[in-house]
Structures are given as C-alpha cells and as structure tokens.
Amino acid sequence: MVKHIILWQLKDELSEAQKDKVKKEIKEGLEGLKGKVPGLIDVNVIIEGLASSNADVMLDSTLESYEALKGYAVHPNHVEVADSKVRPYTKTRICMDFEK
C-alpha cells in the first residue's frame, strides 16, 4: 500500500468566508473520488485544523500501489477536481508519498 499525504495553504487574498467555502469544496471533491479512481482505497480530507496549524487543508489517502498512485495522478476525475477546486485557490503544496 502507498500513502499519499498533501498539505495545502490557501491563497492569502481569500476572505475567511471564501476559505471556508473552498475547503468544503476541496473536501467534497477529493473524498468523492473514492470508488471512481482504480486503486484508491481510502481518502480523507481534513479542513478543521487546530490554531497551531500552518496548513489549511490536508489530504490523507491510501492507494493499492505505486502504480495506482501514478494512475490516480492522471485520472480524469482527479484532474478535474485538482484543476477546478484545488489549484486555483492554493498557494503552497507539500506532498509526501510512502509505502506502508
């Protein structure tokens, strides 16, 4: 199994209300990929971090294999969510993938 963890910071110019809306849409979009992307076993998006956090959104996903991760990256449903709900609103992205 492969874990795929991403942390994002949202763009500074977004208001708090906009950030709340964007976070909910990211969560809905990414969690909605379960059952649609081959090899994606589990996906959880955390949008309610503690005040000590310096990230706004965390993706915690599990895939069957490294090959499944590569397929996930280019799967049309994932690309659609990334291009419409994530990339336009984020300023930083940190990723860690590892075998479990």
Image (tube, rainbow, N blue to C red):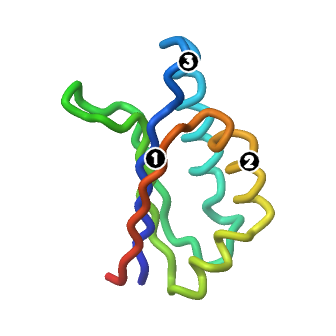
Circle number at residue 13: 3
Q: Earlier in the sequence, mark 3 or mark 2?
A: 3
Q: Is residue 55 left or right of residue 32?
A: left
Measured in 3D between alpha carbons, the distance from the residue under mark 3 to the one under mark 2, in whole angstroms, is 19 Å
Disc 2: which residue: 83
Q: Nearer the viewer, mark 3 or mark 1?
A: 3
Q: Are marks 3 and 1 in contact (CB under 8 Å)?
A: no
> SS class of the residue under badge 2?
helix
> SS class of the residue under badge 3?
loop
Q: Residue 27 at what x, y percent from top left?
A: 55, 41
Q: Residue 7 at what x, y percent from top left?
A: 41, 49
Q: Residue 50 at what x, y percent from top left?
A: 23, 30
From what the image shows, is residue 35 above or below residue 99?
above
Quadrant of the rendered image containing residue 76: bottom right
Kindly identify the amino acid type of the residue bearing the numbered disc 1.
Val
Disc 1: which residue: 45
Q: Are marks 2 and 1 in contact (CB under 8 Å)?
A: no
Kindly identify the amino acid type of the residue bearing the numbered disc 2.
Asp
